[in-house]
Image: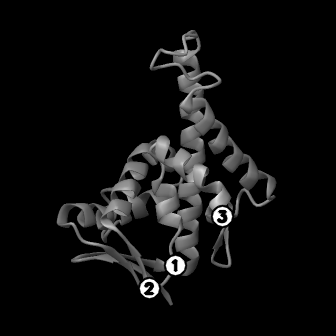
Amino acid sequence: MGIDVVCDDNSFSTSYGYWNTIRETIIKTTFDYIIDKFQKDEELYKNITDENDKHYIGEGSNYFMHKKNINNIINSVSKSGVITNFLYAGDNLVVKFLGSATNLSYIDSLIYFNIGGLYALCNKSDCEGVYSVGNSHDIILLFDLIEPFVKNYDDCYKCIYVVEDRLYNRLYDVFKESIEKNKKVKIW
């Protein structure tokens, strides 16, 4: 028994267990990416104190507010005690944390930093789910941003990105086809 992610002529298949491993890796590497981005931005813009400057990231800025929300997501998942096992029994801690109406601003924060694909990818049923073309755009943007961090997870990297020794389809290809052909991605 497994999962198939399909768009037109392109598909990606794996077991339910490995699908959770892939999503877990994407969550971990997204956190690694955004923490790294925050550090680089802090170094780059640390001397900007003018609140009217478009690069101001200090207290009172949109950047600051959204960064705080992202840090809350990371801290909540970390405090849950299952930092190395985000997905369990089909339940996703990030989605559970973001899913309540009171946390919609956290989803906006993911979108603000171009990592809304994390929510789009993980907020689907493992069977009979559908990703919209818009979801595919968000997921591809996320995959492009986190690629250097996913390289630390060789098996997952090969399932997502183009590598020479991969003989069958990659997850990236399915979502890319969705964008190119303007078609939804189905999960079977």
Report how far apart the C-alphas of labels 2 and 1 lie in the structure. 7 Å
Label 2 residue SS: loop
Q: Is residue 165 left or right of residue 151?
A: left
Report how far apart the C-alphas of labels 2 and 3 lie in the structure. 23 Å
- Which is closer to the viewer, label 2 or label 3? 3
Relative height, residue 38 to residue 87 (above, below): above
Task: Name the residue that disc number 2 marks.
Answer: 128
**Camera sees residue 19:** yes
Q: Residue 46: x percent and y percent?
A: 59, 14
Q: Is residue 105 left or right of residue 8?
A: right
Q: Amino acid at mark 2?
A: Glu
Residue 100 is labelled as 3
Q: In the image, what residue occupies the spot 76% across and 61% down?
A: 82
Relative height, residue 148 to residue 46 (above, below): below
Q: Are marks 2 and 3 in contact (CB under 8 Å)?
A: no
Q: Are marks 2 and 1 in contact (CB under 8 Å)?
A: yes
Q: Amino acid at mark 3?
A: Ser
Q: Residue 20: x percent and y percent?
A: 57, 71
Relative height, residue 102 to residue 188 (above, below): above
Task: Name the residue that disc number 1 marks.
Answer: 125
